[in-house]
Image: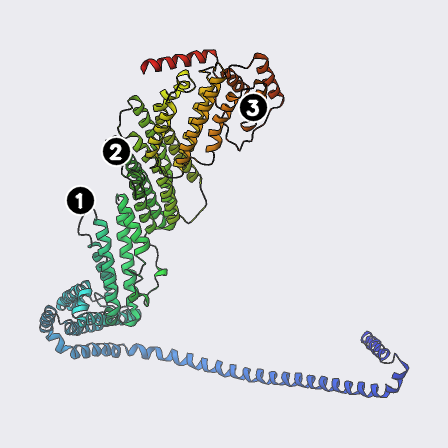
Amino acid sequence: MEETSREAVATAVQRVAGMLQRSDQLDKVEQYRRREARKKASVEARLKAAIQSQLDGVRTGLTQLHSALLDVKDIQGSLADVSKDWRQSINTIENLKDVKDAVVQHSQLASAVENLKNIFSVPEIVADTQQLIEQGELLQAHRKLMELECSRDDLMYEQYRMDSKNTSDMNLISIYFEDVQGLSDELAKQLWMVLQRSMVTVRRDPTMLVSVVRIIEREVKIDRRMVDRKKQSGFIPPGRPKRWKDKMFEVLEGTVSTRIEGTQSVTREADKMWLVRLLEITRKYVLDDLIVVKNLMVQCFPQHYDTFNRFFGLYHNAVSSRVKELAAEDLEANEIVSMLTWVLNTYKSVEMMGHPDLASECDINALEALLPQDVVDDLLSKYVKTFTSNITGWLRKALETDKKDWQKETEPEADQDGYYQTTLPAIVFQMFEQNLQVAAQIDGDFKEQVLKLCLKQMNTFLIRYREEAVTYKEEHLRDRQLPQCYVQYMIAIINNCQTFKESINSLKRKYSQSSEPTDSDAAIERTLSEVAKEGCQFLLDEVFLDLEHHLYELMTRKWLTGSHAVDTICVTVEDYFNDFNKIKKPFNQEMTSEALRRVVVEYIKAVMQKRITFKNADERREGADRMIKEADQFKFLFRKLAAGEDTDRLCGAIAAIAEVFKLTDPTLLFLEVTTLVSKYPDIREEHIQALLAVRGDASREMRQMIIGTLSENKVTYSAVTQPIFKDIAVPTITNTMTSMTSMATAKLLK
């Protein structure tokens, strides 16, 4: 207490010190004192009130405890009186057993009297009920059946109450009413028959279906009442509970399953389109039935049955089971496509479960998948495997057919622009298009997968196509007279490459979501380019085989004295290129440029082979003039053939060499050669040596001086400029002898 007092004093001192920190606050001391006095009075008042409240509560609690004690004593006395009275009444209850038995017997007799009329009329009622069932009057039949069952059940119940162990009397009642159970079973059969034909019944006579549902609802209520009585008394009549409502749903489920399973009218052996027909019939049946359920059958069932959704689920489960059975069969590729298209697309589309007439009643997004994903994946895998095998066979067969066309004696067909072509690209891409259209119906990802597979097979096919084109060329070289239209069909092969490329790009734009090039795309484009370029090379080889003899005449004495070799070369090239105009761009342009290059290179090779050595200035001038004239002929020809911008430069190489030959002052030869080298930096020392040798008047010292000076001042050529002399070899003495022998042989053959 003292410590508390000290703390209070210390707190008060602290507060007073806080109030009187300045001298001007001393004037307010009286004011502070009155305020603190009011606070003190307020606190004391609250304290007194709290103490008074606590005292009142304690007083009230004591009063209630005293009252409770008195009540307990009264109850204790009452219980003692009850116990005493109960002991005295035991003998009295035992004396009332006879009265109890009499009451039970009276109750049974009263029940018997009440049902006496029905008991004597049981055979008659049974016969009437049987007749009503046969006539289809199901409601009236059920009403009489309920009367019979009620009489039987009441008698059995009273017998059970009187003596549950007396089985003989219970059996007697059962034997007397034995026909009742038969009537119940017969009526049930009629009910199930109506339910099995519910889709037909609800269209023709919906009242019949309503009667069936009413009967079943009655039985549900009776079942519930009998089960409740069993809980109280332990007795339940024979045949209860009937559970006709559960049986009704089982019958409806079986009816739906039977309807779905019965849609298959044909087999694969009888009709290749059996699965398509089956799925279409299933679609039509399910849609028609669900529309009937929505518009008619829902009105025949109580609302709490949720009839439409129940039938919707039954049809979904039945279709799912049927589809799983079909998926387990050994389906062919086209059947797998039909199945998956129907399952993944048609089923939930507006053509079936998503039909506008059903949309307001169900949520198709809540439906489970008809087929598990692993089954779908297995079917897709099987389809891909079969498709791969089939497409390999189709491509092989298409190529074999195209190869037979190559041997024809008639030219291939031309497109609307006049370019030769065969039917191979159209056949191949028609196959691809059909399969991609089918794959697109199944799934977007699967469509991409099939497209990749098609492109992969296309690359393999093009490699085989290339090999067959090479074989075609080799067979032709063994006998150049066969086949007669070799050139035209080789042109068609080249054009097919361009068609293939365009078709592939078209397929990718149409069926691929990605525009990024793949490794397969690069491989296909590379193979197509190789096939086309090799085809162009084969055609040029054909041209130069015909030009070979005339090329041998260039830069020979015969050429110098007036040969028509170049005229023949130009006419032959132009004649061939009339056919080569049937080659599509860009290959025709590339081929024309390559033809020009090869002609110029062969001409320069003739110079480098030193087939002739000019004897004097007149021969050099005459030869140079002829070379310039022939260079102009080549230039005119290939400009006409649109060889490209490089025409002047290539033909100019011949004219530049001619200028070296035409020079009359040998002292200026170095300048002329230097000019030639500056124009064509890829020219080598051996080329200069050959040119000077053909000229015939350059001394050994002059040749060495020119070569030495050029070696010291080598000119580098740009890689952008296509070289001419790079691949032209200058023959050695041995090669020269061989060349001369070949020329002699050619002359003898001529």
Q: Give the amino acid at mark 3.
A: Glu
Identify the coloring. rainbow
Judging by the rendered image, the residue that carries numbered circle 3 is 672
Report the Cα–Cα distance between label 1 and label 3.
88 Å
Q: Residue at x 27, y 24 (%)?
A: 481
Residue 61's spot in the image, x, y percent? 60, 83
Identify whether 666 is placed above or below 531.
above
Helix, strand or loop at mark 2: helix
Q: Is the N terminus in the top left, top right, bottom left or bottom right quadrant?
A: bottom right
Q: Given the current orientation, which residue lies at the most extreme front position?
A: 618
- Which residue is identified by label 2? 405
Q: Indicate the amino acid at tag 2.
A: Asp
Is residue 281 left or right of 497 when viewed as pictured?
left
Cα gap from disc 3 to disc 2, whole angstroms = 56 Å
The residue sitting at 21% across, 65% down in the picture is 239
Q: Mark 1 is on which residue type?
A: Glu
Q: Is residue 228 above or below residue 473?
A: below
Mark 2 or mark 1: name the one nearer the start of the chain. 1
Q: Residues within 10 Å of mark 2 (few under 14, many from 20)?
A: some
Q: Which residue is mark 1?
A: 269
297 or 383, which lies in front? 383
The mark total stands at 3
Would residue 710 appear left or right of 448 to someone viewing this image? right
Q: Where's residue 296, x and y in %?
A: 23, 70
Which comes sooner in the sequence, label 1 or label 3?
Answer: 1
Q: Which residue is located at x 37 percent, y 48 percent?
A: 511
Res. 726 in view:
no
Question: Mark 1 packing: few (<14 Cα in 10 Å), some, or many (20+)?
Answer: few
Element at label 1: loop
Quarter location, residue 257? bottom left
The part of the image, by quadrant, that contains residue 460 is: top left
